[in-house]
Amino acid sequence: MAGVQVSNVSRSFGAHKALDDVSIDFADGGFYALLGPSGSGKTTLLRQIAGFDFPDSGRIAIGGESVERVPVEKRRIGMVFQNYALFPNMSVADNVAFGLSVRGEAKAVIATEVQRALDLVQLGKLGGRRPHQLSGGQRQRVALARAIVTKPRVLLLDEPLGALDKALRVDMQIELKRIQREIRITTIFVTHDQEEALTMSDRIGILRDGRLVQEGPPEEIYDRPKSEFAATFLGDANIFRGDSTGSGIRLADGTAIAAGAGATLTAGAKASCAVRPERIRIATDVGASESNANMLRGQVSKRIFAGNNSTYFVERAGQTLKVIVQNTGIERLAEGQDVVLCWSPESTVLIAG
Amino acid sequence: MATTRILEWLGRLYIWLLLAFLYLPIIIMALMSFNVSPFYQLPFEWTTEWYASLWQNDQLIAATWNSVEIAVITTIICTVLGSAASLALYRNEFRGKKFLQALLFPPIAIPWLITGTAMLIFFFGVGIGRGLHAILLGHVALALPYVIVVVSARLQTFAPELEEAARSLGANQWQVTQRVTLPWIMPGVIAGGLFAFAVSFDQFVVSYFLATPGQTTLPVEIYAAIRKGFTPEINAVSTIIIVVSMALMLLTARFFKFGGEK
């Protein structure tokens, strides 16, 4: 088991910069998600760490040892592919045994280890099956067992749950997390699903156009996004744009919005504020709100009922704001109604423009 | 209802006509190899005389063995070289790759008569000359593109992640090829090998040009025998070959399903 350090790694394919000076420290035993839209470089980064491809410049270390020019078969990593990549000509047990077998382990050792790995993923009785006789979730588990049976230094997962349906995906998320805790292996996990990244990982790295946009624990990125992209890609956010007042921004129509978190900016600079939809209170009149709260008036243009909560779309000065309200059964606002929106400065993140 | 039945009936008739067209000449030839009359005269009288006299015909037997030997060696060389070439074309990107792949098709399309003439002139020019070694060389050159085309087609259905997965588990290039890639392309290799065997064993034109008197292959020998005067021994040897090759085909089809997973 080992940590992974990626330092100043760049990789271009022709004129396209797939990775641009990316540095991340993956701590030993951590569960790390690389999150980004398609084409953001997350899979390229994973392939550099795996050793399928080498960086043009920069350093990659696994357990403190430089590996950026070491081919994949010598890196002692475990990898789970998006389409599982199980060997169709082998049984489940032979698939799992493959890594130990090419290493020349004794037959008895292989049999024990394979059974232990299959038990770990709860497929202990299916060793004799062929991959095509398994369901998607079972194939996923076989791929995982095959990747960890060799006791790799890191586990790399390339959108491993992408091919599963929603219910199965949630099961596998819990399962994957349990196994990762049990064997305490450094895990790097590529996904474009923000919910998956939030629920599973200890830390998230957000990539965009080959660059690392922000990196940190899920709560930190969610509560303190450093860019509009991070704010809107991880979760939902209302973005206000204007000029910095030092402690917030002033919108074009003169309205001031106070921000209690985020960047420190000099007054006058272009800036924006991000507010999560569930942090905004919506009401028909001003009522008893705190004196320092941000306040805007608007009109409900649409309401989407989703059972435990409702999303209100509120029109205000040409901007549509999103507010999510838990369904407490007390009050429901109609479309076309004039409303007041309130939220505290602590829920407002100042972002450099 | 009635039309469907008629169509069904017509379909069956078509199949039987097709099979008759394919197999009737062969069946008649096989029957005649057991007929007493050398001139296809009826009534049919059973004999194994022609098989017995075939056994005495050293020239025909020698030519048969030459053919088998050349076809087997051609098959081995072509499956090994052809599979290796297909893998190389699959795995590597290099300048002129498309051109090189396109060059594989003309030898299949060029009439063997022309290829044979060209080989004869070329082999004569560079001192290879004629004989069994020249025939073998010619057959390998003819059969190789078939193997590459068939194995490459099979490789198109191979998922490259499988090789990546094997490598990530610590397998070196040889282990990846032997344990993951080869098992997948094996039906293609077998089919390519059968093609190579057929191209060589059936080969008349090129063999005819490159054979020397006394050292020749079965098709050339049969042709020479027919020109001297037909004997039912030819029917006998042909029947044996048909039985053996059909048995081989059925065996192969039994063990390998062509064109994909079961």
Image (cartoon, coloured by chain):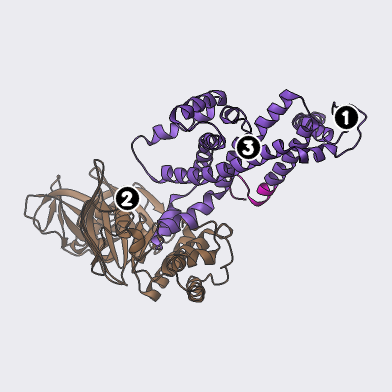
Chain colours: A brown, B purple
Q: Chain of mark 3?
A: B
Which image quarter: residue A73? bottom left
Question: What is the span of residues highlighted in magenta in the rendered image?
Answer: B251-262
- Is B258 placed left or right of B165 in the picture? right
Q: Chain of mark 1?
A: B
Disc 3 residue type?
A: Phe
Residue A163 visible here:
no
Closest to the camera, between mark 2 and mark 3, is: 3
> How many residues crowd around disc 2 within 10 Å: few (fewer than 14), some, or many (20 or more)?
some
CA distance separating discs 2 and 3: 58 Å
Q: Are marks 3 and 1 on the same chain?
A: yes
Determine which residue is flagged by label 3.
B201
Question: x, y percentage for residue A107?
Answer: 51, 73
- Nearer-the-camera pick, B196 or B48: B48
- Is A305 placed left or right of A6 in the picture? right
Determine which residue is flagged by label 2.
A37
Residue B37: numbered disc:
1
Question: x, y percentage for residue A17?
Answer: 24, 46
Of pointers 3 and 1, the one earlier in the residue sequence:
1
CA distance separating discs 3 and 1: 29 Å
Q: Chain of mark 2?
A: A
Do callouts 3 and 1 mark residues in contact (Cβ within 8 Å)? no
Q: In which quadrant will I find the N terminus of chain A?
A: bottom left
The residue shown at (59%, 59%) is: A133
Do callouts 2 and 1 mark residues in contact (Cβ within 8 Å)? no
Query: Does residue B252 belong to the magenta stretch?
Result: yes
CA distance separating discs 2 and 1: 83 Å
Residue A153 visible here:
yes
Question: x, y percentage for residue B105?
Answer: 49, 31
- Is A282 placed left or right of B160 in the picture? left
> How many residues crowd around disc 1 within 10 Å: few (fewer than 14), some, or many (20 or more)?
some
